[in-house]
Amino acid sequence: MKKSITHDSAAQAQPTFGQTRRTLLLGAGALLIAARTVRAATPTLTAEQVVARNVQARGGLAAWRGIGAMAMSGLMDAGRIRPEEPLERDHIPRLRLPRPQDVAQGKMVRLPFELELKRPRKMRLEITFDGQKAVQVFDGTHGWKLRPFLGRHEVENYTPQEARAGAEQQDLDGPLIDHAAKGIAVALEGMEQVEGHDAYKLKLTLKDGRMRRVWVDAQSYLDVMIDGERRLDGKAHVVHTHYRDFRKVNDVLIPFTLETRVQGVHDSETISIDKVALNPPLSDARFARPA
């Protein structure tokens, strides 16, 4: 039986994923897209060598294979909330929130969240807003949600679009760790600068044929940025997410800050994680749809 280990950054003098899943989710999920200069260093490693160093920098393959579940909590940007606008996170289906009367239009709102992840691709997200709690759950195949903010107090099934997003989300350790076992092919596209630092740019071909790109820092070998796609108003938009503030939790490194920017959207979105637990006792019933 795996031991549940909780890390509370506020209780530790020394700093210690916080992916969400990815990220996170849950995500996920804001980034100020780093300036990529025309000048780029010449790659000195192959794609597999970069991945191997990344896995080692994150704590090693054995350590990550030993993590079957993860729980995290913190604060996430809800954006400048208006009744007609959705709150959406990378790897997390949309959640519509009304703006409370005491929040001025245009003011950035941050909401407390709790995210639970379990292999394979199980996710439970709880967001507290205006004294109420919204819940979104994916059991690896099907999803359900509870949205009291809209006056909907009955459990609803995911829409087909939300179900696809849940099925496409990466596992709790991200796409690079154990990538071959996940059916993900990796190719080196060269080097670019991310926030003034050289980074290896890797092209990922996922099992279903979708493409993603990950940037791995050439010094730390941590994955510092990943791209994706989000549909807004029926159109596909490029999304970039930065991973920052990596801390050691037990034997692995996890980013405690995720910043995401959607192409064509003014505001970035930030997820700040303050607590992470590895291998918490999460039963499958935690992800089951209520009767």
Image (cartoon, rainbow, N blue to C red):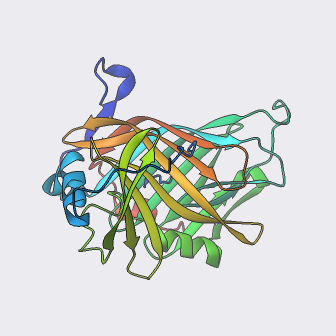
Q: Quadrant of the C terminus?
A: bottom right
Q: Is residue 233 above or below residue 221?
A: below
Q: Residue at x 50, y 47 (%)?
A: 37
Quarter of the rendering containing residue 275: top left
Residue 82: where, in percent of width, then height?
Answer: 82, 46
Q: Left or right: where does residue 250 sit relative to residue 230? A: left
Q: Is residue 65 above or below residue 149?
A: below
Residue 219: where, in percent of width, then height?
Answer: 27, 41
Q: Left or right: where does residue 281 sit relative to residue 251? A: right
**Count of numbered labels shown in the rendering:** 0
Q: Quadrant of the N terminus?
A: bottom left
Q: Left or right: where does residue 262 sit relative to residue 86? A: left
Q: Residue at x 45, y 60 (%)?
A: 123
Q: Is residue 108 above or below residue 205?
A: above
Residue 270: where, in percent of width, then height?
Answer: 57, 40
Q: Residue at x 27, y 41 (%)?
A: 220
State the residue in front, 158 or 34. 34
Q: In this view of the protein, can residue 29 be seen by the observer?
A: no
Q: In this view of the protein, can residue 174 be seen by the observer?
A: yes
Q: Left or right: where does residue 66 sit relative to residue 39? A: left
State the residue in front, 224 or 167. 224
Furthest-front residue in this view? 39
Q: Residue at x 45, y 67 (%)?
A: 212
